[in-house]
């Protein structure tokens, strides 16, 4: 950002993470960033969002839009009926997407039917999301359903539950996954973190959750790989591995690049676990797949990674892979210096010196090559 003066960085963060984003900007030496809150929709904006796509398709949707927005704002608890001042976009999008086919051709719908249909859609979404979380965390579905219904299915789901209380019966990873699924959201009050339902309209369908398992709708390989990266960033290597292996299994004939990225990611996980043999196997599989893409640069960097992994234990094999990488990416000096280190470790001092001298001939200030040359003084 210092080198490119007109570079602007856009960060999209949850409300409870804004302070961390501001701290990041401060560490980067930047002024306090401008912030824009993407809050819930007004009823008028929500109606327009519902009407416009239907009218574009030639359907007069005024009555349905009004009824639907009113229903999404309606909260029923203990015999009381209230309407919120704002509409939650995630719920509106979910209900609209699932109801369009059922309501095709209708110009109006009875209030009770709309309530029933909205509850069905929201309950189904909650159940499938929680079942997916249970499967990911290797927990019984009934356990996760009971936890969510007990903690968030009553008035406390609207008022907010202390973070410590929400994690009493399940792990923090389960709570975070529920937030990722837009079932709950975090708020910070008085320095304490609370979790509450994404919108009070969910209270009614959450109370209707049963105990039985429901089919889990898994996303495609790209989304599963994203989930794997998220899990790794959170430090959950086992969940990251499971997501990545699932992503690899669901790749089709047209997903070669995704498959290659997934294999490379599995290699990264194995490397984090200090399992060099498994890491090298996955990296080789990824390289072979990138070869078929084709992506010469990706193959070169994977061969470099293999060479670096093998360097401590098998310097001879490391030399072979790094030579292959250097032949694909001859202008990458970091690969050349890695090759020099492998040659030196393999006892091939003269060849190593020649590589380092070549690097310094192209970049006289290369620190790794300068350090290696100094270390080699007096050797052979």
Image: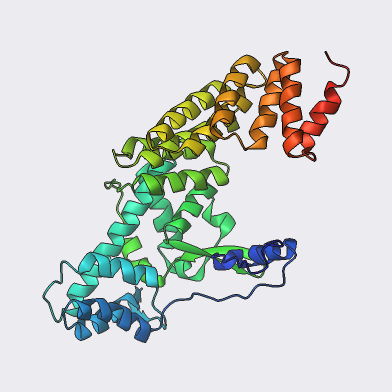
Quarter of the figure with residue 252: top left
Which sits in the foreground, 96 or 206? 96
Toward the left, the furthest residue is 105
* Residue in the image at 72% along x and 30% along y: 358
Identify the colour scheme used: rainbow
Residue 282 is situated, as x and y percent measured from the top left of the image, at 47, 28
Is residue 325 positioned above or below 213 on the image?
Answer: above
Residue 143 makes an appearance in the image = no
- Which residue lies at the image location 82% right of the left edge and 31% below the top edge? 371
With respect to residue 178, does 273 lie above or below?
Answer: above
Q: Nearer the viewer, residue 254 or 359?
A: 359
Number of numbered discs overlaid on the protein picture: 0
Most distant residue in the right direction = 378
Which image quadrant: the C terminus? top right
Q: Nearer the viewer, residue 252 or 17?
A: 252
Which residue: 36% across, 38% down? 256
Residue 329 image position (x, y, % from top left) = 57, 35
Q: As drawn, is 380 to the left or to the right of 311?
A: right
Quick check: 27 left or right of 62?
A: right
- Is residue 315 in view from this perspective? yes
On screen, residue 274 above or below 93:
above
Indicate the quadrant containing the N terminus: top left, top right, bottom left or bottom right. bottom right
Identify the residue at image location x=24%, y=63%.
120
């Amino acid at each position: 950002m210092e080198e490119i003066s007109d570079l602007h960085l856009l960060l999209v963060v949850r409300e409870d993470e804004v302070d961390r984003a501001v701290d990041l900007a401060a560490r980067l030496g930047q002024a306090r960033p401008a912030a824009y809150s993407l809050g819930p929709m007004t009823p008028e904006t929500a109606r327009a969002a519902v009407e416009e796509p239907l009218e574009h398709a030639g359907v007069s949707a005024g009555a349905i839009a009004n009824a639907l927005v009113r229903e999404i704002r309606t909260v029923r608890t203990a015999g009381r009926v209230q309407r919120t001042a704002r509409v939650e976009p995630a719920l509106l999008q979910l209900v609209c997407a699932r109801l369009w086919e059922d309501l095709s051709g209708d110009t109006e719908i009875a209030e009770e039917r709309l309530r029933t249909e909205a509850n069905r859609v929201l309950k189904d979404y909650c159940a499938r999301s929680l079942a997916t979380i249970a499967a990911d965390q290797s927990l019984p579905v009934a356990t996760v359903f009971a936890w969510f219904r007990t903690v968030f299915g009553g008035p406390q789901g609207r008022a907010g539950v202390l973070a410590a209380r929400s994690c009493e019966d399940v792990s923090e990873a389960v709570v975070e996954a529920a937030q990722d699924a837009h079932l709950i959201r975090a708020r910070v009050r008085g320095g304490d973190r609370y979790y509450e339902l994404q919108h009070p309209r969910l209270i009614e369908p959450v109370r209707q959750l049963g105990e039985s398992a429901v089919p889990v709708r898994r996303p495609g390989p790209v989304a599963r790989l994203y989930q794997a990266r998220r899990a790794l960033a959170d430090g959950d290597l086992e969940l990251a591995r499971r997501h990545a292996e699932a992503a690899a299994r669901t790749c089709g004939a047209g997903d070669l690049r995704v498959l290659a990225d997934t294999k490379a990611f599995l290699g990264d996980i194995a490397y984090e676990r200090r399992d060099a043999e498994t890491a090298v196997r996955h990296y080789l599989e990824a390289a072979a797949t990138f070869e078929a893409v084709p992506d010469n640069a990706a193959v070169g960097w994977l061969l470099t990674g293999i060479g670096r992994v093998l360097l401590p234990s098998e310097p001879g094999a490391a030399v072979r892979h790094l030579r292959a990488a250097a032949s694909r990416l001859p202008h990458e000096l970091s690969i050349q210096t890695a090759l020099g280190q492998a040659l030196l470790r393999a006892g091939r001092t003269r060849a190593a010196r020649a590589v380092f001298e070549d690097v310094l001939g192209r970049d006289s200030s290369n620190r790794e090559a300068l350090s290696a040359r100094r270390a080699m003084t007096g050797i052979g």
